[in-house]
Image (tube, rainbow, N blue to C red):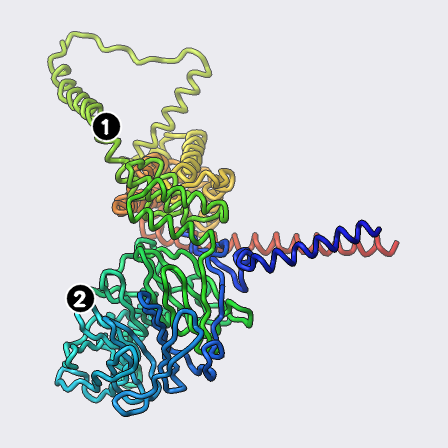
Amino acid sequence: MRTWRKTALMGICILLVLSWAFPALAVTERTGAYETYNYSFADRSELASAAAYIPTRVVRATDMGLTNLRTLSDLYIVEETGDVFLADTDNDRIIRTTLAFDSAKVIDTADGMKFSKPRGVYVSAGYLYVTDTGNKRVVKMTMDGETLAVWGKPDSPQFSAGVDFKPQKVVVTDQGEISIVCEGIYEGLVTIDQQGEFQGYSGTIPVKPSVWDLFWRMISTREQLATMTSFLPVTYINVDLDEEGFIMATSQAEQSTMANSVQRLNPGGNDVLINNSGQNLVGDLGNLYDGRAVGASVMNDIATMPGGMYACVDSRRSKVFVYDDDGEMLFAFGGLGSQDGNISVPSAVDTVGFTLYVADSSKGQITVFEPTAYGQCLIQGIIDYNNGEYESSRANFNEAFRYNTNCELAYLGIGRSQMREGQYKDAMASFRLASSRTYYSRALEQYRQEVFDESFTGIFAVIAAVLAIAVIKPIVKRFKKPSQKEKKEWQPKSALGRKTDKLLKDVDFSFYCALHPFKGFHELRHEGQGSILGGTVILCLYIILSVMRSTLSGFLFGGSVDQNPLLTAISVFAPILLFVVANWCITTLMEGEGRMRDIYKGVCYALMPMALGQVLMLVLSNVLTLNEISIYSVLDYGLWIYTIFLLLAGNMLAHGFSMGQTVRAALVTVIAMVVIVFLMYLFFNLIFEVIGFGDQIYQEVAFRV
């Protein structure tokens, strides 16, 4: 017993020593006080992820020897010098500190006037720019707080009349132009030069009213229109400058239109942000209308990182979102709470390399987030890809699978590297695993061109042979001797052969019905052409080809081998059977002449074009790209329209109706189908209730006995 106790005590001591000696290891292994996730390219469902960032430090005012921070509105890090500037709004001061956060200098005066509610801070070319919101001015200072220039409301007739100048955030371009986010100004960013002269507005966000808004305005009276708010553009919230000198700006996404919340403005003020993800850059996608916070994310700030990546903070849901240079969301993390790593109201974010510094205006603190091994793999994979190091990029993405086997982004990165190296077929497989239709379409286009280039000679020979046969055959037929006896038509001798031949002729008659619908369906009803068996064969062929289309269609058009063939077959057969029964019930009441067998035959024979169309659509779905999806859609709609026309023609001749009567009968049939389904639902629901009630009685009796 003593030996066991000594061993246990020694083990505990060793663990305590290790935890003291390697504190970073303990931090690295934990996942934090929040979940990390992404969104699937397939259906925008939320995908849980391994932790990409973890909190490594929480900085408070006491660490810098200051009184509590009140409404920490902005922060800016000068990476070259390690200086950090904070806008402590409700304390009316700007704080200069370092990345160690162990001391601070307070700047609270400019040009002899106390700061009032300063909300923005920016450093460019060694100069400090402050938006002194309460005093309605922008101040240019040295890094030590010496005032160099003060600019108030621009004195220009082009500036918005009757609007107060309330600067919120500021950014300075490499050319020295000062772009300002102003409260209540919807024309875009206010741009002035270093002398304070107004240069105009840039980056106006276009108005995108929803269809519902336009509808209500269309039907509203003049009095109602007068009370409605006009469609004003969205104002910017924050700005930053990326590596190439473009302004990165955030705005409030309109929930009705879901426009992007992030813009990348070129010198002309145009949004040139790349977004290849197929998903709107609005932060959270999956919980817009439910949960505690309702509505689109509010991107309070944006910070750029190396390689064109950027991070945004959402003050509505207390989250951090990280995107790559193609607009792909790499990961989202954060949330409300009292633990380290939770953020109440993230007001600002800045970066040093890939380390994130997130300011919390509610708690008055700064949380430092470092990438985990998983996050580093994804980030380094993107960096290597952008640098053309595709083999190294794939190695990093493969390493990411060790931490997250459900990482679509890793598959996406591998596919992009493969496509860059000309491995288009392998890239298609990777993009399919990533559920990315956009990139799959690009790889398919390149692979199709590659196959065409390699097989051009063979394709050309086949086309030439077909054309030659088409030209030579009429010539040979013209010079054929008239005296030559025509071969007798082959007649099967056995009973099975005759039945098979009759069945083939019955099936072949469907082509005649498709080409001559009114005459063909008349003969089908009144002259004994076709048969129930022939129609059943056509129906079975249609069901089989529909199952093949649903499972073997291209990835871009929804094909999946995971689909249940039996359920697909039932989903095709059940509506047809239901239509036959409902139509017979309705047309009997309307004194239609057709019997159920006539309706069934007409429906089956009308399906032949659709059945053969499944083959065409199956082939096209595996060769067309997203840019050519209109071709697929037109052909698909055309098949449906022609099949419906054949159904109406067959129904009309089966019952002896006019076309108007047939259309009315068809509409009532659809209503009857809905009623039948509803009654079946009630019937089976009642049966299950009775069975459940009987089971409860049996259990009660068995328990008491």
Q: Is residue 158 visible?
A: yes
Indicate the position of residue 274 as horizontal and vertical percent values: 27, 57
Looking at the picture, does residue 137 appear above or below residue 125? below
Given the current orientation, which residue lies at the most extreme right position? Answer: 705
Q: Is residue 232 visible?
A: no
Secondary structure beneath disc 1?
A: helix
Q: Amino acid at mark 2?
A: Pro
| Count of numbered labels shown in the rendering | 2
- Name the residue nearer the viewer: 152 or 47: 152
Position of residue 177 in the picture relative to residue 220 (left or right)? left
Position of residue 677 in the picture relative to residue 691 (left or right)? left
Q: Residues within 10 Å of mark 1 (few under 14, many from 20)?
A: few
Indicate the position of residue 705 as horizontal and vertical percent values: 88, 53
Name the residue tied to disc 1.
454
Q: Residue at (52%, 52%) from the top-left corner?
A: 677
Looking at the picture, does residue 695 appear above or below residue 213? above
Q: Which callout, 1 or 2, points to the residue nearer the camera?
A: 2
> What is the spatial separation of the Cα atoms under label 1 and label 2, in whole angstroms?
45 Å
Q: Residue at (31%, 65%) from the top-left corner?
A: 80
